[in-house]
């Protein structure tokens, strides 16, 4: 266990790795589904050599470097290497393509990108629209430089020939990484995440799950999100316990992995839990060492299945955002079905307030969940290149989550619904504006709005529905149009339903009334299927 968990000035994950590796260099830490392994000592040595290589390439402190990788030891080595150097890792979702990917790479202005060989063709399609990008480092089989004309293409294993980097490490206030999160009125925003903020995710997990020697973490969620990288991998690093990282989630392999890796703890999302539970029951369902599952949202019907069918003793929930960390946690042995958990009062203030006036509501009243940190740099620093959005979110010195909830006097919070129009599907926040931008560019489309409708699969959160106004005289084939959209969108952003309408309901000021469309449901809509 890292000795500085109570010292916010030492909340730096690379520093924690150095301390634990110094005490127990041969202790196993990380294994991945591709056969890679790292002891704590190897993780430190490899990441320090990667830091030296990045520095030799001209990467400076505070410079942003893109990371476009699948889960695995290479991801972790690159991420920690940039951390040692006090550079900033900009983490890109591996499902991104086209305009989604172009926006994030251009917005972050990275001149160097570490990319999986499998994703090179995806990058090649937009490379000529990224003027800041100069160097691409390919992880995996050597890529032909011809696929990326005009760019310097390097092979990742070259870091192995560099000596360990040594130099001043980062401070807790330095920006460790940028993660993009979707809004409702425009493109996704980059969240600037200080080192202390990143470490606090893991500290909260350790406290919530009471992690100790003998625990083993199973990680099937993507490392480009805070849940996989910071709540889980970060917690395993700080606690000094082993972790197994799967390249991609597989519902079919989930229980087999849990059993084979002798995992004692893991995290799920509502949708992911639903996929696990949907697997056919088997005699081996309770043959494992899993003692706790942290799932958000934790649907009551999922909790029953995880406890009764799979024999998991503790199924906990929590509430958080990339911007605000995890200010609300469940407790071992204290199940309250439907609740998100209790406020983490040591590190956060949480209140329920009127979303328009910011007047605080009383116990049990529904309003907006608003949060602020009690420790320095335990929150996001700002939105990248969006000072007006930062100020808007921080109105009256409280972060406005856009989510509705209630809170009891003892701090138990229940999430009710989203105030914002943001769509959430299969664990991803989706900006309607980005989906609309892609669909609006398709032939025959005059106007379009994207919005959330309930999924017919428990725990799968939302499905995406389009209301579309065709151009005059246009004849639309709904199936073909949705398939064209799917070719241009990440899998998690692909619409399922389409309704052709004569006009969209709008306010007097021209704002589309999504609430009116949601109330109409899916009746009469074309369904592409799940």
Image (cartoon, rainbow, N blue to C red):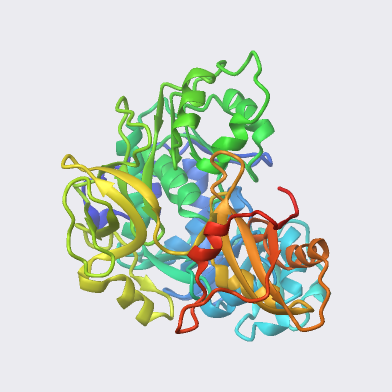
| Number of numbered callouts drawn | 0
**Compared to 444, does 378 lie above or below?**
above
- Using the rendered image of the protein, determine whether residue 176 is visible from the camera's viewpoint: yes
Tell whether 465 sits left or right of 25. right
**Compared to 103, does 345 lie above or below?**
above
Position in image of residue 308 (x %, y %)? 49, 18
Which residue: 67% across, 58% down? 157
Tell whether 169 sits left or right of 373. right
**Which quarter of the figure has residue 373?**
bottom left
Seen from the viewer's position, the closer of residues 348 and 306 is 306
Position in image of residue 122 (x %, y %)? 74, 67
Tell whether 482 sits left or right of 176. right
Which residue: 35% across, 72% down? 382
Which residue: 39% across, 56% down? 321
**Which quarter of the figure has residue 294?**
top left
- Using the rendered image of the protein, determine whether residue 151 is visible from the camera's viewpoint: no
**Compared to 277, does 507 lie above or below?**
below
Position in image of residue 366 (x %, y %)? 27, 52
Which residue: 58% across, 80% down? 106
């Amino acid at each position: 266990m890292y000795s500085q968990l109570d010292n916010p000035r030492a909340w730096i994950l690379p520093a924690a790795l150095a301390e634990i590796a110094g005490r127990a260099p041969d202790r196993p830490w990380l294994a991945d589904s591709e056969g890679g392994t790292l002891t704590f000592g190897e993780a430190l040595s490899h990441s320090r050599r990667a830091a030296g290589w990045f520095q030799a390439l001209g990467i400076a402190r505070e410079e942003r470097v893109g990371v476009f990788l699948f889960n695995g030891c290479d991801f972790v080595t690159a991420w920690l290497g940039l951390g040692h150097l006090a550079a900033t890792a900009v983490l890109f979702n591996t499902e991104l393509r086209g305009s989604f990917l172009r926006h994030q790479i251009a917005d972050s202005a990275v001149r160097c990108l570490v990319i999986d060989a499998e994703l090179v063709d995806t990058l090649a399609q937009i490379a000529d629209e990224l003027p800041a990008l100069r160097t691409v480092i390919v992880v995996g089989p050597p890529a032909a430089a011809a696929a990326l004309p005009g760019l310097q293409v390097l092979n990742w294993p070259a870091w192995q020939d560099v000596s360990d980097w040594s130099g001043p490490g980062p401070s807790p206030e330095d920006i460790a990484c940028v993660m993009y999160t979707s809004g409702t009125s425009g493109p996704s925003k980059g969240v600037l995440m200080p080192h202390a903020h990143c470490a606090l995710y893991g500290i909260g997990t350790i406290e919530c799950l009471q992690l100790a020697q003998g625990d083993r973490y199973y990680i099937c969620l993507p490392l480009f999100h805070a849940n996989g990288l910071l709540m889980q991998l970060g917690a395993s690093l700080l606690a000094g316990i082993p972790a197994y990282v799967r390249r991609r989630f597989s519902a079919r392999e989930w229980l087999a992995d849990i059993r084979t890796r002798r995992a004692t703890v893991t995290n799920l999302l509502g949708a992911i839990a639903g996929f696990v539970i949907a697997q056919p029951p088997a005699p081996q369902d309770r043959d494992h060492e899993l003692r706790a599952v942290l799932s958000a949202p934790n649907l009551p019907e999922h909790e029953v299945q995880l406890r009764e069918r799979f024999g998991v003793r503790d199924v906990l929930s929590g509430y958080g955002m990339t911007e605000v960390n995890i200010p609300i946690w469940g407790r071992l042995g204290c199940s309250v079905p439907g609740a998100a958990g209790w406020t983490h009062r040591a590190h956060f203030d949480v209140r329920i307030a009127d979303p328009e006036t910011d007047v605080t509501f009383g116990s049990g009243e529904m309003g907006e969940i608003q949060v602020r940190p009690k420790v320095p740099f335990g929150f996001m620093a700002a939105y990248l290149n969006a000072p007006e959005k930062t100020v808007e979110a921080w109105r009256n010195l409280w972060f406005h989550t856009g989510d509705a909830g209630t809170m009891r006097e003892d701090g138990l919070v229940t999430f009710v619904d989203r105030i914002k129009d943001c769509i959430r599907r299969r664990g991803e926040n989706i900006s309607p504006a980005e989906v609309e931008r892609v669909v609006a560019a398709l032939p025959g489309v005059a106007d379009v709005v994207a919005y959330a409708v309930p999924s017919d699969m428990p725990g799968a959160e939302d499905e995406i529905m389009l209301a579309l106004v065709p151009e005059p005289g246009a004849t639309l084939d709904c199936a073909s149009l949705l398939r064209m959209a799917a070719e241009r969108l990440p899998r998690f952003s692909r619409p399922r339903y389409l309704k052709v309408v004569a006009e969209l309901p709008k306010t007097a000021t021209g704002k589309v009334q999504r609430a009116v469309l949601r109330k109409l449901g899916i009746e009469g809509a074309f369904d592409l299927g799940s």
